[in-house]
């Protein structure tokens, strides 16, 4: 299977299940089915504006135009809201990459390029990049939040990268290093890019596009992975 960018993650739309003509939903049913997504959309904007600690469930409800009681019908806590946001917006992207890497053939270098492209898309999205920023800002006060994000997002990303690196080392494309440690070195600038995008870029006169930074990182990283010349 040849790796191509369009086949990876550029189509982030989820396919909806088609309703049978015999089971056409009523307006009330359509409204109820759409409500979780509306609540999450309101929650993301509220978290971005107030931060996680300062946000209350009633703030999310008010932004979504529903009562406080309504939001509790779907999510028992704001921690559950955050977890739902991650599962709805980031986990599907990671799962698509995992599925592709499991069957893909081609150089490891190309796969790392695709990892950079995937993360650059998230870093360029002002709303999505708020999710890792929330974790970085609130981890000390909400360790369960950090633990969840580490498992669902960072852990999966590290596993994908370590697998790519291990394959490249076994084929001789990369020099022999500890793939687990090297994967962390690959991921670290991505986390920094998210922090920079949300903290410093808004006050810079000419903010650097995340993809420009990450492409430069990959170039330097690949140079460091080159096999050592035979003596």
Image: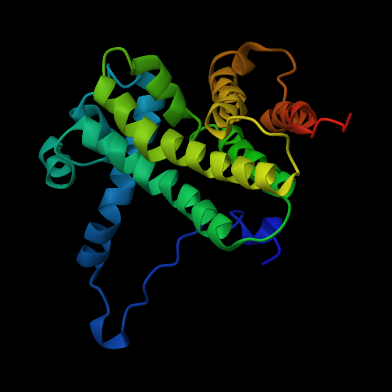
Residue 85 placement (x, y as % from top left) = 35, 40
Q: Nearer the viewer, residue 28 or 86?
A: 86
Give the residue at x 64% y 62%.
7
Most extreme residue toward the bottom, as rendered? 22
Q: Quarter of the image containing the C terminus? A: top right
The colour style of the image is rainbow
Give the residue at x 63% y 47%.
167
Q: Nearer the viewer, residue 167 or 215?
A: 167
Question: 110 above or below 134?
Answer: below
Residue 208 visible within the image:
yes
Residue 202 placement (x, y as % from top left) = 60, 17
Residue 65 placement (x, y as % from top left) = 25, 40
Give the residue at x 67% y 59%.
6
Q: Is residue 134 left or right of residue 173?
A: left
Q: Is residue 129 left or right of residue 227?
A: left
Exactly how many numbered labels are in the figure? 0
Quadrant in the picture for residue 218: top right
Q: Nearer the viewer, residue 174 or 193?
A: 174
Q: Is residue 153 left or right of residue 198?
A: left
Question: 25 above or below 200?
Answer: below
Give the residue at x 37% y 39%.
152
Residue 41 visible within the image:
no
Q: Quarter of the image containing the N terminus? A: bottom right
Most extreme residue toward the front, as rendered? 231
Residue 110 placement (x, y as % from top left) = 73, 48
């Amino acid at each position: 299977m040849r790796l191509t960018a369009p086949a990876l993650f550029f189509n982030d739309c989820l396919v909806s299940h088609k309703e049978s003509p015999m089971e056409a939903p009523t307006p009330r049913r359509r409204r109820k089915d759409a409500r979780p997504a509306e609540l999450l959309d309101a929650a993301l904007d509220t978290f971005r504006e107030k931060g996680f600690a300062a946000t209350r469930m009633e703030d999310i409800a008010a932004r979504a135009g529903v009562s406080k009681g309504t939001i509790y019908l779907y999510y028992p806590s704001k921690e559950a809201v955050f977890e739902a946001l991650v599962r709805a917006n980031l986990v599907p992207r990671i799962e698509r990459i995992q599925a592709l890497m499991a069957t893909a053939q081609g150089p490891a270098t190309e796969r790392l390029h695709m990892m950079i492209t995937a993360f650059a898309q998230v870093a360029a999205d002002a709303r999505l990049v708020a999710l890792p920023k929330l974790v970085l800002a609130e981890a000390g006060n909400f360790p369960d939040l950090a633990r969840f994000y580490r498992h669902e997002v960072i852990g999966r990303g590290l596993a994908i990268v370590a697998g790519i690196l291990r394959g490249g080392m076994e084929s001789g494309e990369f020099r022999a290093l500890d793939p687990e440690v090297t994967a962390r070195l690959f991921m670290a600038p991505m986390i920094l890019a998210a922090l920079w995008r949300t903290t410093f870029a808004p006050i810079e006169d000419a903010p650097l596009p995340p993809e420009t930074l990450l492409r430069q990182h990959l170039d330097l990283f690949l140079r460091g992975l080159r096999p050592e010349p035979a003596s």
